[in-house]
Amino acid sequence: MEAKRNYSWIFFFISMALVFSLQNIWLSSRQLAEIPYSEFQKLLNDKKVDNLTISDQFIRGEFKEPRPDKKKEFFTARLPTDLAKDFAGSGVTYTRVVESRFFRDLLSWTIPALIFVGLWFFLSRVIAGKGGFGAGLMSIGKSRAKLYVETDVKVTFADVAGVDEAIDELQEVVEFLKDPTQYSRLGARMPKGILLIGPPGTGKTLLAKAVAGEAKVPFFSISGSEFVELFVGVGAARVRDLFVQAREKAPCIIFIDELDALGKMRSTFMGGAGGHDEKEQTLNQLLAELDGFDTKSGIILLAATNRPEILDPALLRAGRFDRQVLVDRPDKKGRESILRVHLQKIKYDPHLQVDYLAALTSGFTGADLANLINEAALIATRRKAAIVDQSDFFNAIERTVAGLEKKNRILNPKERRTVAFHEMGHALVAGAIPGCDKPQKVSIIPHGIGALGYTIQRPTEDRYIITRDELLSKMAVLLGGRAAEMLVFNELSTGAANDLVQVTNIAEALVSQYGMSNALGTVVFDRHMSPFLQGPFPDYEPRHYSEETANLIDREIKNVIEEALLKAKIILQQNRHVLEAGAQLLLEKETLSENELKTLFLQIVGAAPEILSKDS
């Protein structure tokens, strides 16, 4: 506050000085009249001027009498060549002043030069991304890595949850940084580079900071995109400067986030530069630096990416990034641990069922769970609650999955009835198929972008392997809405557009990627869908099968979708009374909870009918 007050006084005095200066300039401009030389001659002959000052080009003087028309006291006029005869016998006092042009000429040259230099400094700071006055073009090649000293990194492994396997892998790095001699006594060496691989939001950056926080060493953090600039060679210079700084601070950790922006696979595909552009020169310099330092110096390079398949093989070979650590989506136990870590930041109900929330959030990453808790806290704040309870978390999950509720969107009665049967078709098929995720909530209130209703299913457990029958059941649930519309209204609508996209993707993967078609055999056809078979340019991968095979793939995909649709139709036909009752109840209440759905599904006829599987 004291500093702000001092700045306020300085600004006040500067403002006042500018005001007085402008006032003096304005007053002087009002007292001085510029007149032509012919008028000056007339005034001189009439002896109405005095106290003349003559320079090389101008004559300045004072009027003897005030001029009531213009209210000017002084005048100036441009001089002709010869003046002696004009002043002879005039009787006025005059002096001649020889003005020095040195400073005027000097300023006429230096001021434009200073303006040009100032503009140059400004542009160079913008290009270099620096803020200080001395940050010119010479700083473009400097590393932009943020340096966190030992006391700056507050994150430890206690702040990271749900990735126990990755923590176990990195614990060895921490021990090495604390005592390098312990690992060198038998001749072993630590890996030069450790690559953290995992989907976005799984905590790779947080994990790298935790390693530095545990080891109590300096931590250099930079994104891969910050190395790449417009000018060729700038990125390579920044890589060199980064490792120079790291050697001065060793033992330390260098962390490069989004490594794929820097380490993308080099290729001459489609007329590429083949090693002469900025990205590839930067990658070449990074490879050289990785070869040029020994882990005995105490430098550990950590990097993170969610696209390991596009990284250059030279970057991943032994001796560079020796070790790859998978930071995957957390399982149920991991999600529960992550929720408990983030729950410490809010006021929540002590009786909150954290394990139940973890079961409901299958597939969520650490970032998703952190956002979920924040969203629940916002919902509780809006309703003026003292604590965040279970219902707030359910609403937060609903908002995360289905989107923002649109209360002002009103459907006409026909659309509303169509949506009710559509959503109840999803819920009924899901409730009738054994082993399928049971519906938790059904609503016909519009949410999100284009969603006129939604059905939320509660996963019973985390699944890592899924069978063909389970894929067909998942497709049948997605097609339950379309099947209900066909059964009740005998017509089709655009309401199933998103469902059809998901169904087609599953059917295409089932036939072309998973080898689950008897007609096609256990062959992968669409290699761009499989991360195990992708090349350096998956979007441009050529087709490795004939036109006849392509036609067969199309027919098989259609057959699989028709099989799932038939399964949904049979379930709805056998339970038409449940579908009608559920849709009517949904029209009355707009939203049905899990308990209401369980009561309704008690009327379902037996288990789901077994459909004779087509050889597809």
Image (spheres, rainbow, N blue to C red):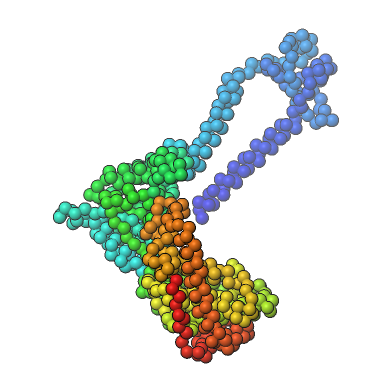
Q: Where is residue 470, by image quadrant?
A: bottom left
* Number of numbered callouts drawn: 0
How far across and how far down the image is residue 83, in percent?
74, 11
Image-based side of 21 in relation to 174, left or right: right
Q: Residue at x 52, y 82 (%)?
A: 570
Nearer-the-camera pick, 137 or 593: 593
Nearer-the-camera pick, 471 or 284: 471
Image-based side of 393 in relation to 244, left or right: right
Residue 396 visible within the image = no
Image-based side of 559 in relation to 524, left or right: right
Residue 436 visible within the image = yes
- Image quarter of the C terminus: bottom left
How far across and how far down the image is residue 538, in percent?
44, 54
Image-based side of 583 in relation to 146, left or right: right
How far across and how far down the image is residue 26, in percent?
71, 35
Q: Measured along the vertical axis of the image, is residue 402 above or below residue 102?
A: below
Q: Residue at x 50, y 64 (%)?
A: 554
Q: Measured along the vertical axis of the image, is residue 209 above or below residue 278?
A: below
Q: Residue at x 38, y 55 (%)?
A: 309
Q: Measured along the vertical axis of the image, is residue 269 above or below residue 493?
A: above
Q: Residue at x 31, y 64 (%)?
A: 167
Nearer-the-camera pick, 345 or 537: 537
Nearer-the-camera pick, 180 or 592: 592
Among all residues in the image, which is located at the extreme left? 186
